[in-house]
Image: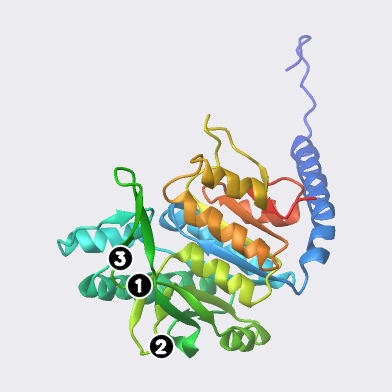
Amino acid sequence: MTEDGTAASHHPGAGDKARRRVEWLAQAGILTEALPFMRRYNDKTLVIKYCGHAMGDARLASLFARDIVLLKQVGVDPIVVHGGGPQIGQMLNRMQKESVFVDGLRVTDQETVDIVEMVLAGSINKQIVAQLNQAGGRAVGLCGKDGNLIVARKVQHKVHDPESNIEKLLDLGFVGEPDRINPEILQVIQKSDIIPVIAPIGVSENGGTYNSNDDTVAGAIAAAMGATRLLLLTDVSGVLDKQGKLMEVLTVGQAKALMKDGTISGGMIPKLETCVQAVESGCEAAVVLDGRVPHAMLLEFFTARGAGTLVSRGA
């Protein structure tokens, strides 16, 4: 009723229509903004390292799968390389095996590497494949043993002893690093419009099994496939300075300096090393991306805004 007692005139749905129109215009603006980026990455290979909170959270995992399928449908060739550290840790705890890490690398005996292979190539890999297929894509799971995709060598890890000021070699057990990537199987899969999902299990020249760092494997595959860009999804906002502030853009030289002066430490070291090596091997850029941000990949690829730290050659 109005103040004079007459019936108020209402137009049901008018406000909703106006609101929907604003939303549609906003969506059209997003598509318009994305179009140049879609053209830029059309028929380009992008390698995405997937792990951490983004993989353990059901909602983020579903969004990740849909985003990967969308990338494929708009003409991009995504390759997913996944980790699974928390899941490996849980399984080792269930089997009462203690986990030991040095500079972000897991010390691995024979029993441990068998468990790692079971969790990565068996359980997690197939879960991701199923999620991508459920989201409307066509995915296939691989590990480094398939087609000799990742031929690995034993990691020779050096540790600096501050007391003696001497570098010592530490035996990490069955921990390997890519010695050679044989990309033929990935090239065949890409021609079939299938999304490859890779577990970072390497195979030695004599057929042995090596647990390999997922960041390092992703970087090696990006280099071998001539990828335009490498994305490393993490559980942090990106590379942080000593005050904890996000550094949004780094050159290769700046990244090397940050590792040398101790600003970067722990698990971020192999990530930044991988970014540097990928860019030096020909990638346009590598990004340490916050996987906790919904649609972080789409923001990175299809907008002028990012969600992490971009490493490039610089000017």
Residue 88 appears in which quarter of the rendering? Answer: bottom left
Please identify the residue farthest to the left as the structure is shown: 96
Residue 14's place in the image compared with 178, above or below, is: above
Please tell me which residue is depicted at 68% across the width and 86% down the height of the picture.
Answer: 191
Please tell me which residue is depicted at 48% across the width and 52% down the height of the picture.
Answer: 269
Residue identifier under label 3: 172
Q: Is residue 65 visible?
A: no
Mark 2 nearby-residue class (10 Å; few <14, some 14–19, many ≥20): few
Whole-percent x and y of residue 227?
Answer: 68, 70
Mark 3 lies on a secondary structure that is loop
Mark sitting earlier along the chain (2/1): 1
Mark sitting earlier along the chain (1/3): 1
Residue 154's place in the image compared with 203, above or below, is: above
In the image, 73 versus 123, the foreground residue is 123
Query: How far apart are labels 2 and 1 at the CA level?
Result: 25 Å
Residue identifier under label 1: 123
Whole-percent x and y of residue 99?
Answer: 24, 58
Q: Quadrant of the N terminus?
A: top right
Mark 1 lies on a secondary structure that is helix
Type of the residue with mark 2:
Glu
Query: How far apart are labels 1 and 3 at the CA level?
Result: 24 Å
Mark 2 lies on a secondary structure that is loop
Q: Are marks 2 and 1 in contact (CB under 8 Å)?
A: no
Question: What numbered label is drawn on residue 205?
Answer: 2
Mark 1 nearby-residue class (10 Å; few <14, some 14–19, many ≥20): few
Q: Are marks 3 and 2 in contact (CB under 8 Å)?
A: no
Residue 163 appears in which quarter of the rendering? Answer: top left
In the image, 75 versus 89, the foreground residue is 89
> Which label lies toward us, 1 or 3?
3
Mark 3 nearby-residue class (10 Å; few <14, some 14–19, many ≥20): some
